[in-house]
Amino acid sequence: MASSWKRYGAIQFLVIAFAGAPSVMCAQHLSAEKIIANSVAANKKDFEAATHYNWKERERTSKGFKTSQVTMIDGTPYYRLIAMNGKPLSRSQQAQEKKKEQQAAAERAAESPAQRRDRIEKFEKERRRDAEMMAQLTKAFTFTLVGQQKVRGFDVWALKATPCKDYQPPTMETQVLTGMRGQLWIDQKTFQWVKVVAEVVHPVSIGGFLARVEPGTRFELENAPVPGGVWLASHFSMKSDAKVLHMFDHSSQEEDTYFDYQKIAGK
């Protein structure tokens, strides 16, 4: 993906990609449908709260790992480099990066109302697109409860998600769902998603002839509790395999770790 925020958009896609309509149910023995339904309210709360936090992000690059402090500045995130391969920047490098951040903050503060609106609108567009998929996703998958397990110290329900054979995706974005299957591990106490794995199991054409997502494309997401009573991403990895215009192969790998979430004052 082209930017860190686009990777975050992919994470949000995974968070809602198997969700349905909210429901509150109390039962000791829950069906897969009830577990998924209960998880939606928790995921919706997390999705809405995500922009109320600053955090640190460790990203794998061709040169190793770089770590950034991510700060929400006037409605959109700013990434300030703080370390490379686990080694903090020198004092002069830190000062230079801090100066860049201050300049970005000043530029945003000096924007006209139209410029600010356009910048935030671009940022929010992907988030809304992901959220709007929610209405389609219970139609796209069938869920099966496979048992109870323990993952990273959490007691979880383990579920499998398989595509419904008669599902007809109404948009280009939802076409990829027809070729995916997934596994979910949902916390039994909070209905939060501890881990999600999704993979493409057969080729899916996107936008007709524009691109094709190939088997081997795989996403993995782990969430963890953060201050404020919500859960946010702690680790995300992606391996993608696609053909663009049926001529050019495009493969990529990404790995990101998210930590030190700090709730923004007043949010």
Image (cartoon, helix red, strand yellow):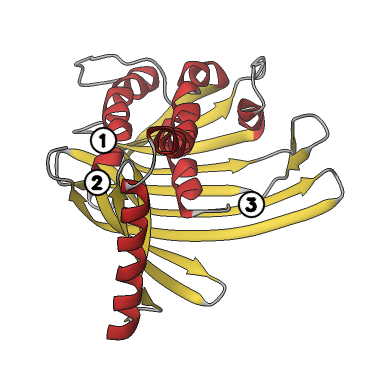
Q: How many marks?
A: 3
Residue at 69% across / 51% down in the picture? 241
In this view, 12 is above or below 69: above
Write down the residue under mark 2.
53
Q: Are marks 3 and 1 in contact (CB under 8 Å)?
A: no
Q: Residues within 10 Å of mark 2 (few under 14, many from 20)?
A: many
Label 1 and label 2: CA atoms lie apart by: 8 Å
Label 3 and label 1: CA atoms lie apart by: 28 Å
Write down the residue under mark 3.
240
Give left or right: position of 125 versus 227: right
Local SS, label 1 = helix
Quadrant showing the C terminus: top left
Answer with mark 3 or mark 1, whichever residue precedes in sequence.
1
Write down the residue under mark 1.
49
Return the residue nearer the eye: 219 or 125. Answer: 125
- Of all residues shown, which one is farthest toward the right? 247
Answer with mark 3 or mark 2, whichever residue precedes in sequence.
2
Q: Residues within 10 Å of mark 3 (few under 14, many from 20)?
A: some
Frontmost of labels 3 and 2 is 2
Q: Residues within 10 Å of mark 1 (few under 14, many from 20)?
A: some
Q: The disc labelled 1 sits on which kind of residue?
A: Ala
Q: The disc labelled 3 sits on which kind of residue?
A: Ser
Q: Are marks 1 and 2 in contact (CB under 8 Å)?
A: yes
